Image (cartoon, rainbow, N blue to C red):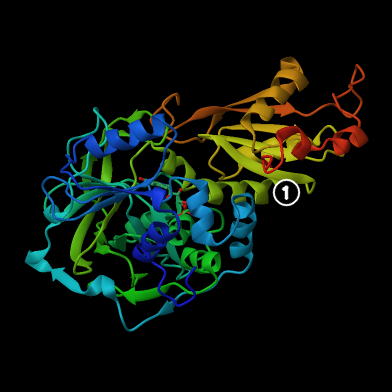
Amino acid sequence: VRGDGADDLRSFLERLRRERPGDVVDVRREVSPRHETAAILARLEERFRSPVLVFHRVRGSLLPVVTNVCGTVARLALALGCRVADLAERYARACERPVPPVFTGEAPVQEIVRTGADVDLSFLPALVYHEHDAPNPWITAAIVAARDPDSGTVNLSYHRLMVDGKDRTSIYMEPGKHLDRIRLRHEAAGHEMPIAAFIGAHPAWSVGACFTGSPDVEEYAIAGGLVGEPVALARCVTQPSVPVPARAEIVLEGVVPPAERLEEGPFGEFTGHATGTMAAPVFRVTAITSRRDPLFQDVVSGSFEHLLLPSLGIERHALEVARKAVPGVAAARLLAPLTIAVSLRKRDDGEPWRVIEALLDSDVYTKHVVVVDEDVSAVDARQVWTAVALRVQADRGVRIYPGRRGTPLDPSADSADGRTAKMGIDATTPLRPARPLTRNSIPREVLESVDLRAILGEGLTPRA
Ligand SMILES: Cc1cc2nc3c(=O)[nH]c(=O)nc-3n(C[C@H](O)[C@H](O)[C@H](O)COP(=O)(O)O)c2cc1C
């Protein structure tokens, strides 16, 4: 956090290069935009490496491609100025104390302005990730800003864009997401929806955009709360009702017309599986603005970054819903796609089911919920599955909820609208267990008497 109002993607990359040089890898040889950037990240992830990748020469475009910016929790913590262990608390604090954005006179993202016949998306890198993806160029790291016509609040969320011609893309909006709800209200009134998709974001803007919960919350203010100072905004040139960060890299301004549709997909999603094709709404681009030398930010679909980016927002919302049902909820963690673990200090044996049903009935993006006792760490998948193994009798501890609203992105859903069975697992120990439970423990005084320095040798620092 610089504290001078100039946080942006560039300042964050500079800071990484200075403070964690191993976290940025410059690829200077020419690479193909078709599968090769995705392949390089996939090979690194196989080796548990996850640096930011800067591809300086991507065939077919003059723009450098920056990918995997938010690919590790350590980088998110650096960007938000906290320890990894405090990320959830930092996010919760930003939601309690949002910092509203401010308009600024100077907008580097409008150094170059192209409108009308000069609008041409073909200068962007034509990235394609997976073998089964539609061959059109995909834009995955565009954060879409739109104003709610009723409340006036500005919504931010990520939406994949499939480029189709020089001034047109499809835009995928999951049913139920705020942007889709805003679109439906414009469509019902026969209006086009003004939007702006900005590319090139400080990580605080990225995780702020992934806030989920009340539609009255302005995500720019969450982004501001995350770094403790307002995000500087500029008004769009052709869509003046929509504000964008003045220090983004590229902005695509335009409208989503009420009736136009475009066949989009297939596309390999965060689930690791491809969606089919669908008739998606269209984004008509009315202006492209950018810096003089813009960076093109990207998220490799299905990479760890793609899972990590929305997790802080989903976990905060899950915790809010779970605590409203049962105040003794300690933590909520997104363990895998659509899978949330909740830890709980239980006062009666009905509480885990109240948490499970509250979450499965809510708009929290989840399908399976596991509730564990407070002595199990919800952030540790091994501990959670150990509790499922050793504290559950499946005929009592598992409940199935058929025919619920899920996500069309779940490849196991029965229909294209995402109808799904949901599942809750109560992996807590009954307050009065049938057989006495004795957890392994070593007497505290013996644990405390162990002198690791003496055992590991002087000068060796034991791992925490
Ligand atoms: C990289 C990335 C890509 C995403 N792509 C889409 C998308 O194409 N469509 C969509 O509806 N949501 C997408 N999302 C999820 C939304 O951004 C996320 O659910 C957001 O928080 C929506 O919140 P809202 O309903 O509060 O506006 C994506 C998220 C990330 C991190």
Residue 220 vertical position relative to residue 56 in the rendered view, above or below: below
Q: Position of residue 180 (x, y in %)?
A: 39, 51
Q: Residue at x 12, y 62 (%)?
A: 119
Give how far across and how far down residue 145 sits, in percent: 37, 62
Question: Which percent across, then down, holds residue 109?
Answer: 27, 70
**Residue closer to the observer: 210 or 414:** 210
Which quadrant would residue 134 be assigned to in this image?
top left
Up-down relation of residue 333 to residue 286 (above or below): above
Residue 93 occupies quadrant? bottom right
Q: Residues within 10 Å of mark 1 (few under 14, many from 20)?
A: some
| Figure check: 44 above or below 393 | below
> Can residue 239 be spotted in the picture?
no
The quarter of the rendered structure image containing the C terminus is: top right
Q: Nearer the viewer, residue 138 or 275?
A: 138
Outermost residue, front side: 458
Residue 207: image location, x then y, percent = 48, 55
Circle 1 residue: 323
Say which element carries label 1: helix
Looking at the image, the residue that sits furthest to the bottom is 105
Which residue is painted at 72% across and 50% down in the image?
Answer: 324
Which one is nearer the viewer's eye here, 254 or 17?
17
The amino acid pointed to by label 1 is Arg
Residue in the picture at 18% in, 55% down: 63
Q: Is residue 436 left or right of residue 381?
A: right
Q: Give the side of residue 393 with respect to residue 230, left or right.
A: right
The image quadrant that residue 243 belongs to is: bottom left
